Image (spheres, rainbow, N blue to C red):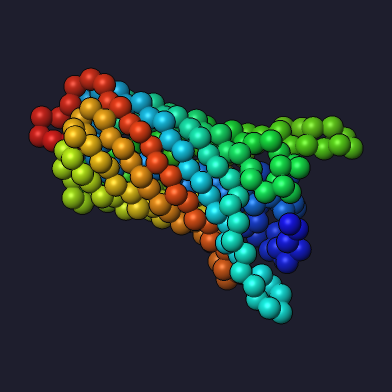
Amino acid sequence: MKRNYNLKILKGGSIAMISLLLLLSSCISMAPVNSTFESAKTLSKGQFELQGHYSKYTYRDKAEEAEMATTNEASNTNVGVRVGYGISDRLDLKLRYERLKPLLQEDKDQVDGINYFSLTPRYNILKDYISVGVELGLYKTTVKDAESGDYSESAFVISPRLAFTYPSTPYFDLTLTSKLDIFTEGSGTYLGLNLGCGLSSDMNVWALRPEAGLMFSLDDIGYGVVWKTIGVALIVKIGPAKKDGI
């Protein structure tokens, strides 16, 4: 379904949510990666973490038409993996790969999917309850072009974030995370909010993490564009654990 009303906000970049520079003039509705699937607690020194996750993104836009209709459509599904390592009991480092698959036909006509790579150092500033991190990300894709031939495109993003967890027990935790996606080529800034929990019999060994989130374009916030996310991750930890809990 073609959404011509979106042409009014293309320059701000909200409709080109992947923020790949040469796609800012197209109607791609895929969302940037928003999910985090973690608590504020960092890994123990010498501890490894393995994670697999799945998420689905829904695009919501209030049409700039006489009827002011609201559009709600599933935009993309993501599947990814992540590996983490505890450098100290308060500092860890995580490497992530995620594949974004388009669901809307107009997006499928332009890309088969998008690859996302990131590296994230995190520091636990208030033991077990508050942490800060900076995710350094790279989006890469191949754009379909029947006239001149397919070509590759990429975009770098810096994503500072803050996570607050309470309660934090070996069996359950609840985490609120806020993040900013700042694309280095000036092609958009996005605010993401996530609420997730951890469920386990022992968080030092494994955890199931369901999560829901919202994302907004700060450049076009007046247009009522919101992206909803929902997903789940399975996490396995290997190695020494902190003596006093998760």
Residue 27 seen from this side: yes
Residue 74 picture location, percent across and down: 58, 52
Q: Which quadrant of the view contains residue 119?
A: top left
Q: Position of residue 65 (x, y in %)?
A: 71, 75
- The quadrant of the picture occupied by the N terminus is bottom right
Instruction: Answer with left or right where residue 173 lies relative to residue 189.
Output: left
Hey, which quadrant is residue 121 in on the image?
A: top left
Residue farthest to the right, as pictured: 147
**At which x and y percent is residue 214?**
46, 57
Q: Relative to 19, is 50 above or below?
A: above
Is residue 68 depicted above or below 125 in this figure? below
Question: How many numbered discs?
Answer: 0
Q: Nearer the viewer, residue 246 or 148?
A: 246
Q: Position of residue 85 (x, y in %)?
A: 32, 25
What's the residue at 23%, 20% (across, down)? 239
Please indicate whether residue 154 sits to the left or right of residue 53 in the image. Answer: right
Query: Residue visible at 61% across and 69% down?
Result: 70
Q: Please, is residue 244 above or below residue 109 in the view?
A: above
State the quadrant of the C terminus. top left
Q: Residue drawn at (29%, 47%), measured in percent from left and top?
A: 197
Instruction: Report the front residue among 237 and 136.
Output: 237
Residue displayed at 45% across by 29% down: 81
In the image, farthest residue toward the bottom? 66
